[in-house]
Amino acid sequence: MKKQLTSLLLAVSTLTVTAQNKATINADEGKAVINRHIYGHFAEHLGRCIYDGFYVGETNTKIPNKNGVRLDVIEALKKMKIPNLRWPGGCFADTYHWKDGIGPKAKRPKIVNTWWGGVTEDNSFGTHDFLNMCELLGTEPYLAGNVGSGTVQDLSEWVQYVNFEKNSPMSNLRQQNGREKPWNVRFWGVGNEAWGCGGNMKPDYYANIYRQYSTFMNGQVGKERIFRIASGASSDDYNWTETLMKNIPVNMLEGLAMHHYSVFSWDEGKKGSATAFTEDEYFRTIQQALRMDELIQKHSAIMDKYDPQKKVALVVDEWGAWYNVEPGTNPGFLYQQNTMRDAILAGATLNIFHKHADRVRMANLAQAVNVLQAVILTKGDKILLTPTYHVLEMYNVHQDATMLPVDLKADDYEVGKDKLPAVSVSASRDKAGKVHVSLVNINPNKPQDISVNLKGLKASGVTGRVLTSAKVQDHNTFENLNKIKPAAFNGAKVSGDNLTVTLPPVSVVVLELN
Ligand code: AHR
């Protein structure tokens, strides 16, 4: 009997909340600003991202559009406060010749998209289409230049075409093509994944190539020099970062990229389903995502040696989850669904970026529409906002706010012999003085209690929003668009400098303290 009672008590205790999560928000220590550009996105000529996703063509009468760009997508991305958009790739960028995409559409050459599905690219969405779309979105364009199969002249002429005011062959050409004023593009990538699809280069070779290309990328945007971003390391390739930082003078470099995907196996067909996954697969995906903290620390430490004043930004211009494509879809199109697992991944990753706000000043989730960890999926004239969309929309209160450092002692979330922190926390103070706290419950099986000491802050009230669902596999579908959407949250209490929160299992929460 006694044994039965003990087992019953044990069983009950595993269902109730834990009380070990403790955090201190150092509200009196904020220095670094969370650059809004860490909330950037990525649109590649890949699968249905551009064609069907952003662009349905000027002659489309079924889907409301402006110059062929779908207005439902524009409206949703504006609401999310998209700060920048990277284009045209990815791997596609190093095959892209920008002059193919200007002038009368009927005369533009057709090419084969060799990286993504071998489909015909008719170049109907080119430089004018993209940059005008960015104006519609109110977002800053980030153009990725072709280094792998282009020339120094091509890239320097692209800069002149979009940025030179007048009286140059390229600005004259732009004006002939109907655009009087330059677009003044600040962000420029000098190739993409130069260690792989961008040319399989060695780091010292690319460092020289970078120096050559960037020398001829002239011009200012406002008072600042254009922002040149070197193609960076894949995940933990620290030698790439070391070689570039050693060989490129800091005054020739504004940003250094890094790519990290949360994928537990790169073997073909072994990345797991986006929706039908086990707890072990959930655990391993989030484990890969949380590696971002260590990756940033180690790449930053190398950058600190050569750039102690942190002039060069670490730009994580591709991040997110990568699964098997949805059954029945083109394997070259990288179309995947998006569940609460992805919401948790996004919330925890953004909290890591905030923590490193002094060095990570730009990032791009891969990708915006219909590809990888998309914020929007489209089907005909319908659009679906994914759980990841809702996290980015809820978190936009952190854009350009001052990061408040957090000390966290988290409970463990264990699967087998492995463990992860059960919660992730970040905080910031916006320009109006409001403090926001974002929290993620990583443990899908248990609610989490967290007690937060607000050091240097007395709050009198708290409001919040939560994104939650019963299971990590839950997702929105075209039949049920609103299964997962933010709701009011009433699981937080504040009294003076003490905040207590109970996070439901499978949840992302953003609080506002008053
Ligand atoms: O985002 C998909 C691909 O992943 C990009 O084209 C490439 O840069 C990366 O390998």
Image: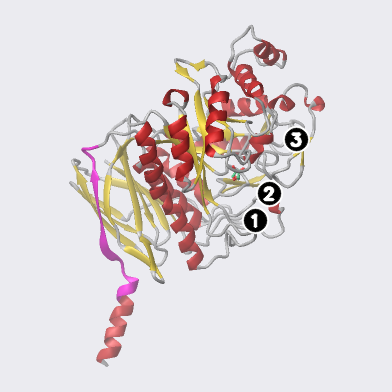
* Quarter of the rendered image showing ligand 1: top right
Distance, label 3 to label 2, CA atoms, is 23 Å
Residue kind at label 2, given as amino acid type: Phe
Location of residue 58 with respect to 291 vertically, above or below: above
Q: Is residue 336 left or right of residue 504?
A: right
Instruction: Count the marks.
Output: 3
Farthest residue in the bottom direction? Answer: 1
Quadrant of the image containing the C terminus = top left
Q: Is residue 434 left or right of residue 52?
A: left
Distance, label 2 to label 1, CA atoms, is 8 Å
Location of residue 67 with respect to 314 vertically, above or below: above
Decide whether residue 15 is among the magenta residues: yes
Q: Residues within 10 Å of mark 1 (few under 14, many from 20)?
A: many
Q: Which residue is depicted at the point 74% across and 30% down?
A: 58
Residue kind at label 1, given as amino acid type: Val
Q: Secondary structure at mark 3?
A: loop
Q: Residues within 10 Å of mark 2 (few under 14, many from 20)?
A: many
Q: Mark 3 vs mark 2: which is more N-terminal?
A: 3
Observer-nearest residue: 489 or 244? 244
Whether pointer 3 and pointer 2 mark residues with C-beta atoms closer than 8 Å, the reply is: no
Residue kind at label 3, given as amino acid type: Asn
The stretch in magenta equals 13-29
Q: Which residue is depicted at the point 35% across and 35% down?
A: 305
* Residue at the disc numbered 1: 325
Image disc number at residue 333:
2
Image disc number at residue 60:
3
